[in-house]
């Protein structure tokens, strides 16, 4: 079993910055792809914000390109999301996601509990 714990959410004014962190822990052999999704108020779906492979290849939603940066520290099993030039439309609950190979050799996709990001003046 493994778990993901996010931190770093909060409230910020438009144009501000926040950094989200997500720590994986548990009976982990390796962590493969990791990513951040968000669910905006009043919506039912989570949209991909950014993803990163274990080798460091990244992918971003068009709406955040040039403003957000995803990174990871493989040894620490941590993924980050640096969010700059935040806009009110970035307001959402942000969820960490990771594909984890457990020590039992079972492969499972895990989700964090979510962290609220609010951008408002």
Image (cartoon, rainbow, N blue to C red):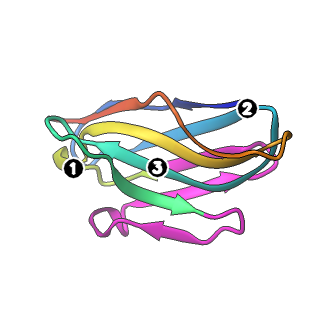
* Residue denoted by label 3: 36
Mark pair 1, 3: CA separation: 17 Å
Q: Quadrant of residue 53?
A: bottom right
Q: What residue is pinned by disc 2?
A: 25
- Earlier sequence position, callout 1 versus callout 3: 3
Q: Are marks 1 and 2 in contact (CB under 8 Å)?
A: no
- Of marks 1 and 2, the one in the foreground: 2
- Residue occupying the point 30% across, 70% down: 62
Q: Which element carries disc 1, helix, strand or loop?
A: loop
Write down the region rendered in magenta.
53-81
Which element is circle 3 on?
strand
Callout 1: 10 Å neighbours few (<14), some, many (20+)?
Answer: many
> Where does the image place residue 79, in percent across and percent down from the top left?
61, 47
Residue picked out by circle 1: 87
**Residue in front for this viewpoint, 92 or 68:** 92
Residue 90 among magenta residues: no
Looking at the image, residue 16 sits to the left or right of residue 53; the answer is: left
C-alpha gap between disc 1 and disc 2: 32 Å
In the image, residue 96 sits, relative to residue 74, either above or below, namely above
Instruction: Please state, as top left, top right, bottom left or bottom right, where the N terminus lies in the image.
Output: top right
Q: Which mark is residue 52?
A: none
Which of the two discs, 1 and 2, labels the residue nearer the N terminus? 2
């Amino acid at each position: 079993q493994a778990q993901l714990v996010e931190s770093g959410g909060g409230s910020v004014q438009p144009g501000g910055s926040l950094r989200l962190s997500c720590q994986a822990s548990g009976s982990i052999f390796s962590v493969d792809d990791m990513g951040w999704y968000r669910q905006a108020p009043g919506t039912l779906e989570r949209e991909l914000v950014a993803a990163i492979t274990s080798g460091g290849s990244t992918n971003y939603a068009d709406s955040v390109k040039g403003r957000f940066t995803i990174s990871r520290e493989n040894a620490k099993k941590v993924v980050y999301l640096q969010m700059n030039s935040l806009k009110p439309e970035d307001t959402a609950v942000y969820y960490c996601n990771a594909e984890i190979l457990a020590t039992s050799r079972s492969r499972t996709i895990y989700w964090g509990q979510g962290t609220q990001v609010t951008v408002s003046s």
